[in-house]
Image (tube, rainbow, N blue to C red):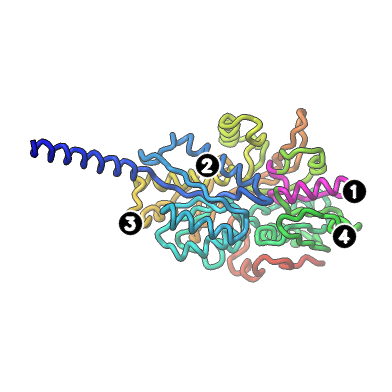
Amino acid sequence: MRKALLTAVAVCSLVAASSVAGAQEKLKIGMMATLSGALTSGGEDGVRGVQVALKQLGNKIAGREVELIIATTDASPDSALRAARKLVEQDKVQVIVGPLSGSEGIAIRDYSKTVPNVTVVDGSSGALETTYVNPSPNYFRFNSNGAMWMAGLGEYVFKDKGFKKIAVIAEDYSFPYTQVFGFALGYCSAGGQITQRQWVPLGTKDFGSVIANIPDDVDAVFLGLGGGDAVNFLNQYSQTGGNAKFVGGSIMVDQTVLSSKGAAKKLLVGTPSSGGVADAWDDPRWKAWVKSYQDAFPPDKRFASPSLFATNYYNAFTALATGLAKVNADLSDGGAKLRTELAKVELDAPNGKIKLDDDRQAIATTFITEVAELPNGELTNKFVRIVPNVSKTMGLSPEAFKAVGLPSRTNPECKK
């Protein structure tokens, strides 16, 4: 009887051990998403992008079920650091997708250096410095930075649209600095002038004084706003009866704004912009991605077309899954083999081919677009042209690009 009892105990121990091992087989992946603050709509669509990627993978990578753990941020660096520490220290993840916003990315780049066994794949943040200044060996970005998203736009609005003199209204942090920087490189070299720059805090509610200060003698206003700030500006500008022409930053004309409620967004019809996606691009891979996104969620739970954030997070997760599959999701070496494989990943992504440079920064396609109204009243980004294989030095030699300096409120200058 004692022998039978010992045998039973041994069997139970094996079952328990097997159950624990089975539980550990889940592959934990952390995700940082901006789900509060002015960029909430972008964060929500970033989550949708990852959900579509997971659905296409059957929620498994290398045969292991994925446990996605989402940590919320509000687009501030402090919130991003809290989220990352929670994922690493409490949830014990070794891989993270995110963050979303520019200054968040810079903060997480620096944090990643303190946790060398954690691999971070940027979600959608676009500050230039993240991968250009003191890049981290375990931080990978499969999306362009904000300057790269502006490639070709400055020349287009100067030569094709005839905007010789513009003013700028943009949020006062790293990503809009990077966007204006990228726009100015082309616009100023083509002969354009930026006569005024107004920088507003992220989360601005009242744009009254900003609108009142727009110069009368400019051909257009560059709007480097996003999310709730963009919608607030358009609503308040429409109430003034203003009729300025606009040039849009990448997230000013994203579906996070174009799909917002109210008629004020129609002020954007005809607005030229550029970025990492074009809603109406007639490419089979893009159309397949749009359909997958639309089919995954009911119409009232998504945008008419996947936003830049959804697309970037989808690509980031797809790249991570590709790298994990190459190493059979084995992170026992602190992720060293994973990082070697990630550096080699080349995506035939919905928005064009993507590969990484030596600093683990994407080389990718930029789309020049114009906002158009569809017969059903929805707004879309009409495809104008592509600028292929844009690198972080924007077509300049490394020496020439370095000489320009880093993006700031005033750099580069843009005068005759």
Image-quadrant location for residue 12: top left
State yes or no: discs 4 and 3 in contact (Cβ < 8 Å). no
Q: Secondary structure at mark 4?
A: loop
State yes or no: discs 1 and 4 in contact (Cβ < 8 Å). no
Q: Secondary structure at mark 2?
A: helix
Task: Residue at 68% x, 41% y: name it.
Answer: 255
Q: Earlier in the sequence, mark 3 or mark 2?
A: 2
Alpha-carbon neighbours of circle 4 within 10 Å: few (<14), some, or many (≥20)?
Answer: few
State yes or no: discs 1 and 3 in contact (Cβ < 8 Å). no
Task: Residue at 74% x, 36% y: name it.
Answer: 379
- The residue identified by callout 3 is 333
Q: Earlier in the sequence, mark 1 or mark 4?
A: 4
Instruction: Give, as a three-letter code, the residue at label 3.
Output: Asp
Q: Nearer the viewer, residue 409 or 384?
A: 409
Asked whether residue 246 is drawn in magenta, I would say yes
Instruction: Give, as a three-letter code, the residue at label 1.
Output: Thr
Whether residue 22 is visible, yes or no, is yes
Q: Earlier in the sequence, mark 1 or mark 2?
A: 2
State yes or no: discs 3 and 2 in contact (Cβ < 8 Å). no
Q: In the picture provided, is 350 more to the left or to the right than 340?
A: right
- Gap between marks 4 and 3, in whole Å? 57 Å
- Gap between marks 3 and 2, in whole Å? 26 Å
Extreme front residue here?
Answer: 1
Alpha-carbon neighbours of circle 2 within 10 Å: few (<14), some, or many (≥20)?
Answer: many
Instruction: Give, as a three-letter code, the residue at label 2.
Output: Val
